[in-house]
Image (cartoon, rainbow, N blue to C red):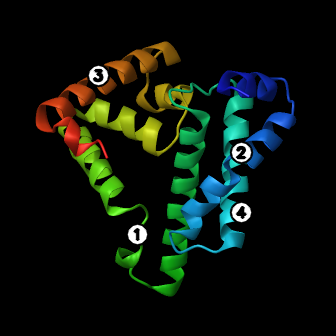
Amino acid sequence: MKDQEVLEKISHGDETALDYLYKKYYRMMTNLVIKNSGTEEEAKDIFQEALVVFWKKAVSGNLVLTSKISTFVYSICLNLWRKELERKSRFSNEEKDGVEFINDEQEEKIKIVHECINELGETCRKILNYHYFDGLSMQDIAEKLGYANTDTAKTKKYKCKQKLFELVKTKYSKSDFLD
């Protein structure tokens, strides 16, 4: 099933799309949690919660998918797991420094992108962080930043993304990003 078909089924309330997503991405998403200090049970919970978040966004009509569904759900899982680890560390007073979310190579790539995002203006920084790292819909971003509508937010996000690509291209070579 293609991503567009999945979204159409979800918009019609067809739960077979949810079953499809669960079966297709279960191992990948749960491995994320398990490889990052989580248990199988925690991984299942995080993945199920991520699917609920995705389903709600898709059903609301506010989901603007700019990547594959797998990428979007992966980022939701990652954010949920990070929040869970932060919550757990507050209770146990353990250092989070020892937790490795992603392998070093991916972490370095993310660091490069974050550095470039931080060099952008405040508006671009907010839009890109809200959208890609906080998982906010374009409607939510428009409201948070006081834009007249989602089209304005989408246009700004597109322009900010272009600025980011240009900045990354000028500062780093392709070999920094290719495996």
Which residue is under mark 3? 162
- Is residue 149 something that shows in the picture? no
Is 122 situated above or below 29?
above
Q: Residue at x 35, y 37 (%)?
A: 126
Cβ atoms at labels 3 and 4 below 8 Å apart: no
Question: Which percent across, then down, holds residue 147?
Answer: 44, 20
Which residue is under mark 2? 24
The alpha-carbon separation of the residues under discs 2 and 3 comes to 32 Å
Of circles 2 and 1, the one toward us is 2
Mark with earlier residue (4, 2):
2
Cβ atoms at labels 4 and 2 below 8 Å apart: no
Cβ atoms at labels 1 and 3 below 8 Å apart: no
Which residue is under mark 4? 45
Is 66 situated above or below 178?
above
Q: What SS does tag 3 mark?
A: helix
Q: Amino acid at mark 3?
A: Gln
Q: Amino acid at mark 1?
A: Glu
Mark with earlier residue (3, 4):
4
Q: Residue at x 72, y 26 (%)?
A: 7
Which residue is under mark 1? 100
The alpha-carbon separation of the residues under discs 4 and 2 comes to 16 Å
The alpha-carbon separation of the residues under discs 2 and 1 comes to 25 Å
| Residue 83 left/right relative to 119 | right
The alpha-carbon separation of the residues under discs 3 and 4 comes to 36 Å
